[in-house]
Amino acid sequence: MQAIILAGGKGTRLAERLHGRPKPLIDVLGVPLLERQLDALAGQGIDNVVVLVNHAADQIEAFFAARPPVPRAKLIDDGAPRGTAGAVLACLEALEGRFLVVYGDTLFDIDIAAMMAEHEASNADISLLLHPNDHPADSDLVEIDGDGWVTAFHSYPHPPEADLRNLVNAAFYICERSALEPWRESPTPLDFAKDLFPRMLAQGARIRGYSSFEYIKDLGTPKRLDKVERHLASGVVERARLTAMQRVVFLDRDGVINVQRDYVRTPDDFELIPGAVEAIRMLNDAEFRVVVVTNQPVIARGEADFDAVQRIHARMESLLGAGGAYIDALYLCPHHPDAGFSGEVAALKGPCECRKPATGLFEQAATAMKIDFAASWMVGDSTSDIEAGRRMNLQTVLVETGTGGLDNKWAVQPSHRAANLLAAARLICASAMKLDITQGSST
Ligand SMILES: [Zn+2]
């Protein structure tokens, strides 16, 4: 595997912290960022590294001369700023058939082999790392279909009323050289996210989104740099590894996050319950993974198709994102056990393994992340939610919003009761803090 580091950035916004160095050499807790990137790559067996330099190339050359040699590192200075894609296209013939593109201003701790496995299995031209963040409104967002294929790119700024899922392009790509070759003569400057990828998509390129909660952040401003340093020092970066056990708060949707109605069929039927944004942001900050598990029999009954439900979730993620909150994953059951509705989808009728209180949605989540179930929670408004949580040995919170537990379908007692999601989040965070103190954890 070959990695290309785009190290041509000036770092104008970081000037006060650079003291004359180029951005890739910014000091991050006493270690230049480029050193951290090389370490992260070497830790995964990647020593074939091409560093594309431009601004202050002499300083980056001096940096390489002064450190233990990277066996297969190569510096290329193409002499002109061409934009991220332009710089890679300009040296394409020096690159291997498949390579990873890393931006010189990001700190990352990503299981590249896992991303590569999915890239290979899908036979994609390009794979993009996607993740939710707490400021999607000023991020480049990507739309994917149910199978993970990119269907649209949305560069910020976004129109105020746009309902977009919180799928941020993290600027970490696996590329097939053959897919880039037809674009070599494109005029520059050319940016991957804003120019090249949207054009490739329009021409039918197979571009895939690889969603992950692993750590990657750009530190292009003093404020972001401070945040990354705090995260490094406190272990946030390591705890977001795929190999680390995750504490999850599973949330039911209707009646917990949003106001329960007979049907939620369009985005306009979706109204957040007061406090939901603050609650989810609190869980994000406490390093819980927030996973929505929702029964959506509207799909089986033919009242809303998958696209309509996607649009509802885009509205949900936009509303949450506007308040700095995000969910890490969402799993839904589209089935319904009883036939007899006009317009129903026959294939989705009948018993299934995923309609809560069955546990299929939780098991799907467990294939995507290592879950510490004993330290994880289920928050719901129905006895089916609480029963599902009980079957998974989760701690459960029944909220008084929505059904408020009055469905009486399952004779099950929750571990806790709370007025609403915000009260539940406070209870969960307080309980987690107590647990951390008794276990002597630094979190
Ligand atoms: Zn199901």
Image (cartoon, grey):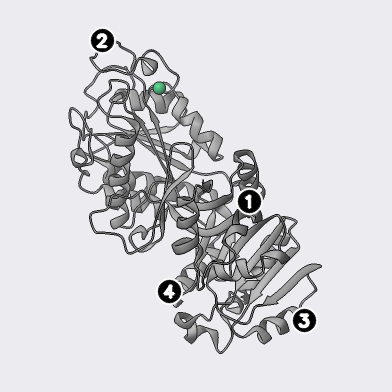
Mark 4 and mark 2: Cα distance apart in space: 57 Å
Question: What residue is shown with label 1?
Answer: 111
Three-letter amino acid code at the position of disc 1: Asp
Of 1 and 98, the residue lying toward us: 98
The residue drawn where x is 20% and y is 29% is: 263
Q: Are marks 4 and 2 in contact (CB under 8 Å)?
A: no
Question: What residue is shown with label 2?
Answer: 340
Label placed on residue 65 = 3
Label placed on residue 223 = 4
| Crowding at mark 4 (Cα within 10 Å: few <14, some 14-19, many 20+) | few
Of 280 and 165, the residue lying toward us: 165
| Quadrant where the image shows the N terminus | bottom right
Of 309 and 96, the residue lying toward us: 96
Q: Are marks 1 and 4 in contact (CB under 8 Å)?
A: no
Label 1: which secondary element: loop
Classify 122 as above or below 43: above
Classify 279 as above or below 371: below
